[in-house]
Image (spheres, grey):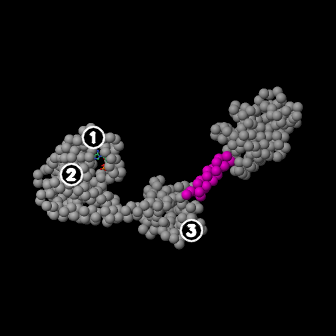
Amino acid sequence: MESQAKQQDAVTRSSLALLLDISRELAASLDLRTVLARVLLLSTVNVGAERGSLIVLNDKGQPVEAALAINGQVFHPTVEEMQSILERGLAGWVAQHRQPALIADTREDERWTRRPDDAAERTGSKSAVCVPLFSSGQLTGVLTLVHAQTGFFTSDHLTLLQGIADLAGIAVRNAHLYRSVQEAQRRYHELFEDSIDPILITDWEGRILEANRQAQVVTACPLETLLECSMHQLQSPQTPPLSQYFQALQEGQTVHYETELQRQGSSALPVEVYIRRVMIGESPMLQWILRDISERKQLDTLRDDLSAMIYHDLRSPLANIISSLDILQTLLPQEAAQTIQPVFDIAVRAAERLQRLISSLLDINRLEAGQPIINKRPVAPHVLVAEAVDATHTLAESKRQQLSVALEDDLPVISVDVDMIRRVLINLIENAIKYTPMQGAIEVGSRREGEMIRFWVRDNGPGIPQDALELIFEKFNRLQGERYPKGLGLGLAFCRLAVRAHGGKIWVESALGEGSNFIFILPLR
Ligand code: ADP
């Protein structure tokens, strides 16, 4: 009796010593395969099994890694093999029921599935023990041990194995998490390195800590040189200091601006810069993505050149045509004047329209570039309205539309670029004529409103849907449908730029099917 108790005591002590050894061994590595091999070898050796397997499961219960131990040698099966081990047989049963199993004779237990290489007549009956591994209540793996002798495993073995499994569950989970983190880091690094945009990581002073391949290509600097630079040195001297964006960056916003990248041995490269805060380990750093915009800049220059071409090559011959038509008219013999005059008028109006279109296109470029209005002069609002109506009434008559004027008496004089504001009014009237059906009514008016002068062009045409009231003032935005004949979609964009450049405001009030009222206000001073 006493000797039995002593024996039991020795077993308990050796089990404890074993568990302590195992926990030390498991803490020594975070590599999943190393951890698996250790758990498996320690278990097989200490429990006296000749074979064993350990399968690691992910959050979805799918096998992600496994180890097989046969006579002290460890092998790693493929994912398919792991899957088949888990789908059938003892390990699958344990994973599914989340409880241990002890099989005294594998021939007599239906949970044991015999594979072709495991025929009873070849390898004989065996005994097996299998336990689930848990970490924070989550199943992380299944550990199975096999012995060639039936009835080899006892409940003591099961208890010991469960103790090992409890320790191993956490170690396996940690190693699995560590592998996932490493994989995520590897993926991030690949993305970082392979990005077609230059990416740099800096501290909050702009000192470069990392730069991808493309950054080295674009700056024509090797990594060692970049790591000695700051972003301040790489960008054009006109670039605002980084400190200006600290608050936005700290709040997690992405800062974005255009600048030029200084390059060794070649010309500066126009780039768009995107900066945002990123956590590298525990420290907040800055990630800079640079985008090459040289092509866009070339297109901008091309557009400007094209505008200049329009200005010089189209505008001056057009002015010549108009003045020649003027001279021709004075030279017309009296008797021919009556028949030829209407044809003359058509030619003059067409040429003037073309001239207005060219001027507005050029103005769009200038105003977009932020150029101020320089040639302001005083003009009475009724003069502007009268001139605009004069330029458009023939067009209205051709559609048998009624073009009326509503002017308040004694309107004060305003100081504006007269040609530009006249073109705004003409644009609105021409739109009203274009979009209003035959025999429609159009009213052009002006009145004082406090310190502003209000102008309007009202029609009883098709109207504009509510959701398009703002959009139609954007460049190239046009309404679709039969009611809206084709146009460039630039007229209203020009009107808005011109009115805003004068410190005013433009908008439209409209109800579908009833008509539109385009209104703009200009400050008196
Ligand atoms: P365009 O007339 O060349 O298309 P605009 O910028 O002048 O370009 O006008 C933009 C769009 O706004 C037009 O295509 C049309 O759909 C709508 N629009 C402008 N004026 C009116 C109007 N008076 N009535 C109805 N729709 C209008």
Horizontal side, residue 204 vs residue 348: left or right: right
- Residue assigned mark 1: 462
Horizontal side, residue 471 vs residue 247: left or right: left
Which amino acid, mark 1?
Pro
The chief SS type of the magenta part is helix
Nearer the observer: mark 1 or 3; the answer is: 1
**Residue occupying image coordinates x 70% and y 50%:** 30
Query: In this orientation, does residue 224 appear?
Result: yes
Query: In this orientation, does residue 496 appear?
Result: no
Which amino acid, mark 2?
Thr
- Residue assigned mark 3: 221
Q: Is residue 348 positioned above or below 510 on the image? A: below
Q: Is mark 3 within 8 Å of ligand 1?
A: no
Q: Secondary structure at mark 1?
A: loop
Give percent across and percent down for residue 369: 34, 61
Give percent across and percent down for residue 226: 56, 67
Q: The magenta stretch spans which residues? A: 174-196
Is 505 part of what is drawn in magenta? Answer: no
Horizontal side, residue 525 vs residue 143: left or right: left
Give percent across and percent down for residue 232: 48, 67
Q: CA distance from mark 1 to mark 2?
A: 20 Å
Nearer the observer: mark 1 or 2; the answer is: 2
**Residue occupying image coordinates x 33% and y 51%:** 488
Residue 357, located in which quarter of the rendered image? bottom left
Q: Which mark is residue 392?
A: 2
Q: Secondary structure at mark 3?
A: loop
**Who is closer to the viewer here, 159 or 518?**
518
